[in-house]
């Protein structure tokens, strides 16, 4: 039915999908009057540090679970829609680097969410051993950075 959405329970909890990769289903959000479910992907890099893709709301219980996995090093906003909780995560993990996909910075800045670096078609040295990436170039509105977790052969998308 148009206009309805459901969460994928349990929400705000780590769900392993392969070795060193988890998803977290988050709360429903509303975008342009439509409800959408949210989902984050977490990868433990070979360095032992964590790569947080499309962060969801950070509850204290979820933060405790994540802290048990390792040190949050990278917080990724993969497109113009999936940046909303980056500021919250940046406050909780001030030593983490915040990465923006193309076209994210101007929109996020309106909400006082700032980034340290921009993502490109080239995987960053910090994760290139574990994760590949490419930018899917869209129209005026959307460009998305797509990631590939090599060891689990998992393709990580948001809205593609």
Image (tube, helix red, strand yellow):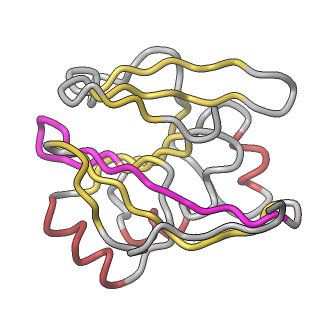
Residue at 60% of width from left, 34% of height from top?
Answer: 101
Quadrant, the N terminus: bottom right
Q: Is residue 110 left or right of residue 119?
A: right
26 left or right of 143 in image: left
Q: Position of residue 11 (x, y in %)?
A: 43, 74
- Which quarter shows the C terminus? top right
User: Going by the image, does 157 lie left or right of 63?
Assistant: right
119 in the magenta segment: no
Q: Position of residue 78 (x, y in %)?
A: 56, 39
Residue at image location 87% in from the left, 26% down from the top: 140
Residue at point 28%, 21% (across, down): 128
Residue 39: within the magenta? Answer: yes
| Picture mark count | 0
Residue at the far front: name it. Answer: 1
Judge by depth and name the residue closer to the eye, 34 or 106: 34
Residue 108 location, x and y as percent?
A: 71, 53
Q: Position of residue 43 (x, y in %)?
A: 27, 44
Residue at image position (50%, 64%) is: 56
In the figure, residue 58 lies in which quadrant? bottom left
Left or right placement of residue 35 versus residue 95 in this view = right
Residue at the outermost bottom position: 60
- Look at the magenta stretch and give its main secondary structure: strand
Magenta residues, start to end = 34-51
Q: Which of these two is toward me, 118 or 145?
A: 145
Picture quadrant where residue 29 is located: bottom right
The vertical placement of 141 against 138, above or below, is below
Whether 94 is drawn above or below 50: the answer is: below
């Amino acid at each position: 039915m148009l206009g309805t959405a459901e969460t994928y329970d349990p929400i705000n909890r780590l769900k392993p999908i392969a070795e060193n990769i988890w998803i977290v289903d988050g709360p429903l959000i509303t975008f342009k009057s439509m409800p959408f479910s949210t989902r984050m992907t977490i990868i433990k890099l070979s360095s032992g540090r964590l790569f947080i893709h499309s962060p969801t709301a950070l509850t204290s219980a979820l933060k405790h679970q994540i802290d048990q996995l390792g040190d949050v090093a990278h917080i990724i906003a993969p497109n113009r829609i999936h940046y909303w909780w980056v500021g919250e995560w940046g406050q909780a993990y001030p030593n983490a680097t915040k990465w923006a996909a193309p076209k994210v910075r101007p929109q996020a800045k309106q909400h006082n969410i700032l980034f340290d670096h921009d993502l490109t078609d080239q995987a960053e040295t910090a994760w290139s051993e574990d994760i590949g990436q490419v930018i899917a170039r869209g129209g005026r509105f959307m460009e998305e950075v797509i990631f590939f977790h090599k060891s689990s052969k998992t393709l990580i998308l948001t809205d593609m």
